Image (tube, rainbow, N blue to C red):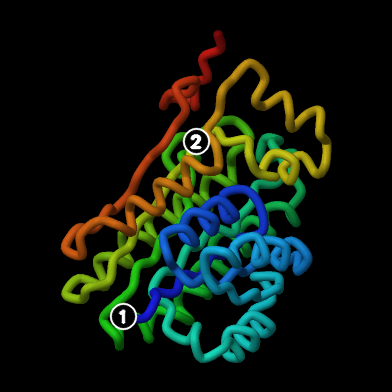
Amino acid sequence: MNQQVALITGASTGIGKAIAQKLATDGFKLILLARRASLLEALKLELSAHTQCHVIACDINDHTDLVSKLNSRPADFQNIDILVNNAGLALGLNPAHETDWLDWQTMINTNCLSLAFLTHQLLPDMVKRNQGHVINIGSIAGSYAYKGGNVYGATKAFVEQFSINLRADLLGTALRVTNVEPGLLNESEFSLVRFKGDENRAAQVYDNLEPLKAEDIGNTVSWVIQQPAHVNINRIEIMPVHQAPGGPITIKH
């Protein structure tokens, strides 16, 4: 049996990298997609002891370039069995009336439009082969409002609704769809990007907390995939013990 192929977006750092590392040890061939070619090549080299990797360095919001590079992937990576829509970002934590419109636009483009676009590109072939699993990396922000979450939370609510509606459309096929929704997690560039490089402000988010680790999400994605073919995990909400629903509330010790 040929190795299955998993395509992971945002694969160069954080959650995407942890997912790639775990799926490599699970025996998947990987398509690693992100903007920074140097980081992707370094990850490809790291994972070469476990599996084959193909690198696609592009901005996921440049749909023309994305399609071109997808269409030129090697023959061994033609059939994509797992799509992990991980690429996404939050920008700013200001209340809605004080935000930068371009930040809102970038979040909508990346977290919603490009996620949907890539899924739309790959889904017909999965349905034709009656084989595939779409795994979206959402967020608890899609379920629980918090001050400054505004459009970011709305984009993650889109991911949740897109996931369950996609599953409804695929009823009668063997395809599976899962939305993985992490809470506070610091082993990524998430807060650094949100605060536009302000390291001190980014660090304060996790002050006196033990947040999730990127490998926690990598292990979760691996577990979801490994479930029997007749089992579909619709959604998984994951929080550290220092966080609880309802705000979200953080508890410091």
Quadrant of the drawing holding the C terminus: top right
Residue 163 spot, x, y in % from top left? 36, 60
Q: Quadrant of the N terminus?
A: bottom left
Horizontal side, residue 83 vs residue 41: left or right: left
Depicted 153 relative to depicted 184: above or below: below
Q: Which residue is mark 1?
A: 1
SS at mark 1 in the image: loop
Q: Residue 53 lies in what quarter of the image? A: bottom right
Q: Secondary structure at mark 2?
A: loop
Amino acid bearing label 2: Gly
Q: Residue at x 41, y 27 (%)?
A: 245
Q: Earlier in the sequence, mark 1 or mark 2?
A: 1
Question: Please, which residue is most extreme toward the front here?
Answer: 49
Q: Nearer the viewer, mark 1 or mark 2?
A: 1
| The quadrant where residue 60 appears | bottom right
Query: In this picture, is 199 found above or below 180?
Result: above
Q: Residue at x 27, y 71 (%)?
A: 175
Residue placed under numbered mark 2 in the picture: 183
